[in-house]
Amino acid sequence: MFKKNIEINKFKNININDPFFDSLKNSCQEFENWFAKKSDDEAYLMKDEEGLIQAFLYIKEEKGEVGDVKPPLPKDQYLKVGTFKINPHGTKLGERFIKKIFDNALSKGIKKIYVTIFPDHQELIQLLEKFGFEKYGHKKTKNGVEDVLLKQIDKISNEVELDYPIINLNRKQYLIGIYPAYHTRLFPDSILHNEDAKIIDDVSHTNSIQKIYICRMKNVEYLKRGDALVIYRTKDEKGSAWYRSVATSLCVVQEVKNKHEFDSLDHFLEYCLPLSVFSEQELKEYYKTWGKLVTIKMTYNAALHNRIIMKQLVEKIGLNKDDYWGFRSITEDQFRHIAKLGGVDESFIVN
């Protein structure tokens, strides 16, 4: 089991003798010297309950031409993924760290990310390619030849996963309400004290880029792939919806399935469990007792840095207070206004 948080720590405080680093030492003769030189730099890591490292990510911002790869990357601003290693456990941990890479790029306004990776790391390469990284070239090192993968965030393919984290408003836009108990588990936003305030730490093991939410609200079955969603956490028990309900996140629909599209309970569980916030027992209960049941698979593209309460959604965005707030359509202008008021860089929303 993992500890809850991704942590940030300086290299000098990270145990290089942790077994996690053995494969990196074996594949790179200079790894220990490189690690020592980075003494005051910071890296992301996750440990298990015994304190052993299970994931490690080092990224840095670069400006100018990148001349040590072939062909050279032209003069620009880049986010370089210097070291990225995951011990796979079937928990979507790789996605979680890829989201961390995109969160950093998003917060810095960087549109190009590159990774150097040995070609035998096929699972990680396939995961990166799923979210828009493409083979660009190669880099020769003392330890062999690494592939160079490049993600151009402003390159639009009109495919939900490949375009991530870009939100393309070429379809419809909606607001969808989620009860606090479920919202906290689906979008557990927690800011690290030593991190840029705009970068969100994901504190749930299941908090990957892809999410599955299950509901039975009216009209949700009409959602289509590519529709953009504003996630709206309904009020808690501490006050009225006017001040306690809040828009928190922006997502894009990948797939919508109705109950009849699952030929069995096992098929339903197999589909939902890896990405859903609901327990197996909850899923079984919903499948057996709900006549109408809709699964919404979506990408988690951005958390709103400034949360927008219902009062603001009515008075500043122009939503009708008397309409149903569980699931409702909104206009492209309203979606853009919510994103802007929430502090999301406008360049990450296109049409």
Image (cartoon, rainbow, N blue to C red):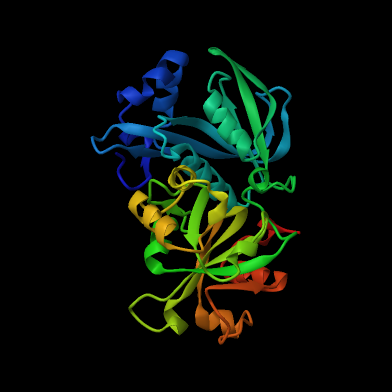
Taking 79 as reference, is 18 above or below it?
A: above
Observer-nearest of 43 and 133: 133
How far from the left and from the top, in percent, is residue 86?
Answer: 43, 31
Position of 318 compared to 75: left or right? left
Percent x, y of residue 312: 55, 81
Tell me the quarter of the image containing the N terminus: top left
Query: Which residue does the image show at 59% across and 30% down from the upper left?
Result: 126
Tell me: 184 left or right of 147: left
How many numbered tags mark residues here?
A: 0
Which residue sits at x=48%, y=31%? 84
> Which residue is farthest left?
50
Q: Nearer the viewer, residue 242 or 173?
A: 173
Image quadrant assignment for residue 138: top right
In this view, 147 is above or below 115: above
Q: Residue at x 39, y 57 (%)?
A: 185
Residue at left offset 36%, top offset 52%: 279
For residue 146, what is the image quadrant? top right
In this orientation, does residue 191 appear?
no
One can see residue 345 in this view: yes
Quarter containing the C terminus? bottom right
Q: Does 292 sit above or below residue 257?
A: below
Q: Where residue 93 appears, x then y in whole percent? A: 43, 39
Lateral position of residue 220 relative to residue 45, left or right: right
Q: Is residue 167 above or below residue 12?
A: below
Q: Position of residue 94 (x, y in %)?
A: 48, 37
